[in-house]
Amino acid sequence: MTSFVSHTTIDARNAYEISEWWKQVLDYGDVPGDPNEPGHAECMIQDVDGSHRILFLEVEEPKSKKNRIHLDLRPTEGDRDTELARLLELGAREVADRRGKYGPGTGWVVLADPEGNEFCILRSEAEVSATEG
């Protein structure tokens, strides 16, 4: 017997606002029949085909340390640096720049969402293929 990941849960100060922000980042939407609204303490979003969900759950305590688990994002179109610029325009904050850490054209950038939750933006699959091929 094994288990599967039902959804990813992220603690939040304002579940609605941060779920709306992540919907823009990931092009996710509300779960059909369960729309998120201001004041909801639990807000779930999902990808287009419903195969991945993220639940934002309001908690009282503020974030205090580095995440022990985080999301690694890969652009679906374009390249890492173009997606980085888009995420910064949406309100992400740069935490650490690891571009080029393992040689030219490698690496990632560590970002934080508006509530301080860290995530990384990686190179696109096309960028990876171009440096490996």
Image (cartoon, rainbow, N blue to C red):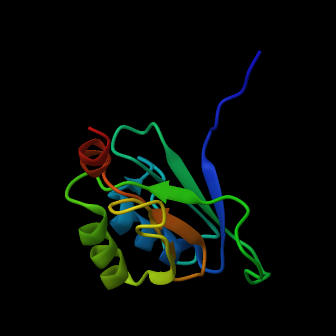
Q: Nearer the viewer, residue 38 or 28?
A: 28
Identify the image quadrant of the C terminus: top left
Tell me: 51 left or right of 63. left
Q: Nearer the viewer, residue 48 or 104?
A: 104
The x, y position of residue 53, in whole percent, is: 51, 47
The x, y position of residue 7, in whole percent, is: 60, 45
- Whether residue 127 appears in this view of the structure is yes
- Whether residue 44 appears in this view of the structure is no
Q: Identify whether 51 is placed above or below 10.
A: above
The x, y position of residue 123, in whole percent, is: 35, 57
Residue at point 77% right, 15% down? 1
The extreme front residue here reads 103
Tell me: 98 left or right of 89. right
Count of marks overlaid on the render: 0
Quadrant in the picture for residue 58: bottom right
The x, y position of residue 95, in whole percent, is: 54, 81
Tell me: 42 left or right of 112. right
The extreme top residue here reads 1
Q: Identify whether 126 is placed above or below 40.
A: above
Quadrant in the picture for residue 91: bottom left
Tell me: 108 left or right of 118. left
Quadrant in the picture for residue 107: bottom left
Residue at point 77% right, 82% down? 64
